[in-house]
Amino acid sequence: MYSLNVSLPSSVTSLAGRLGRELPRARARPRGEHTLVVKRLGSGDHTAYARIEARARDAVRGTAPFEVRLTGVEQFEVAATGPSPVVYLAVESPELRALHERLCEAFDAVEGMEGPDEYVPHVTVARGGDPAAAERLVERDIDPVEWAVEELVFFDAERGQSVSRVSLPA
């Protein structure tokens, strides 16, 4: 599966890593694997990727840099896929949501995750583990983290690596 993601500053990945260590029975995201998905783009071989990237670049053309803000720790008590609960850093950004909607016009929305009322911008901290420990973490206050999104990353989830980047304004 390919996706278009927001580049994360080290302050966000460090926070996610620290919080993940507080959920010892959960599967925390390893360092370097934290993401903020703007839109899942589909799957296919390398030749399909070139077409997917070209379509995505067309869809983001004209996008200016924008602000995002981490607002707290939340959870999906029951995940759409994979182990539950999913503890995550909540993200607010009207521009991110607008970009997601624009990409949903160019690519099919993943059912149950990306529809108009289903997209929840977030950075996953950990999956599974003790629900009570997850609840305690969700109750914790964190200082908001804000940053400017100046580039987007094309990510290959199957290989676990970035494929290319697009600088904003696109």
Image (cartoon, rainbow, N blue to C red):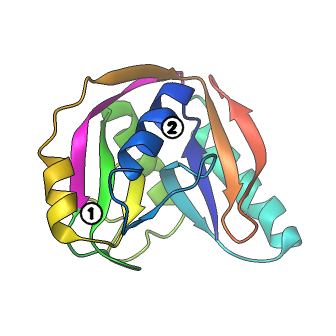
Q: Residue at x 14, y 58 (%)?
A: 135
Rendered location of residue 169, percent (x, y) = 62, 22
- Classify residue 27 as left or right of residue 84: right
Q: Nearer the viewer, mark 1 or mark 2?
A: 2
What SS does tag 1 mark? loop
- For the stretch drawn in magenta, the main secondary structure is strand
76 or 29, which is in the foreground?
29
Q: In which quarter of the image is residue 85?
A: bottom left
**How many numbered callouts?**
2
The quadrant of the picture occupied by the N terminus is: bottom right
Q: What range is drawn magenta here?
A: 64-75
Q: Earlier in the sequence, mark 1 or mark 2?
A: 2
Q: What amino acid type should be assigned to the residue bearing mark 1?
A: Glu
104 or 89, which is in the foreground?
89
Q: Mark 2 points at which residue?
A: 13
Q: Name the residue under label 1.
A: 118
Q: What amino acid type should be assigned to the residue bearing mark 2?
A: Thr
Alpha carbon distance from label 1 to label 2: 24 Å
Q: In this picture, is 126 found above or below 22?
A: below
Seen as rendered, the residue at the extreme right is 47
Is 74 contained in the magenta span?
A: yes
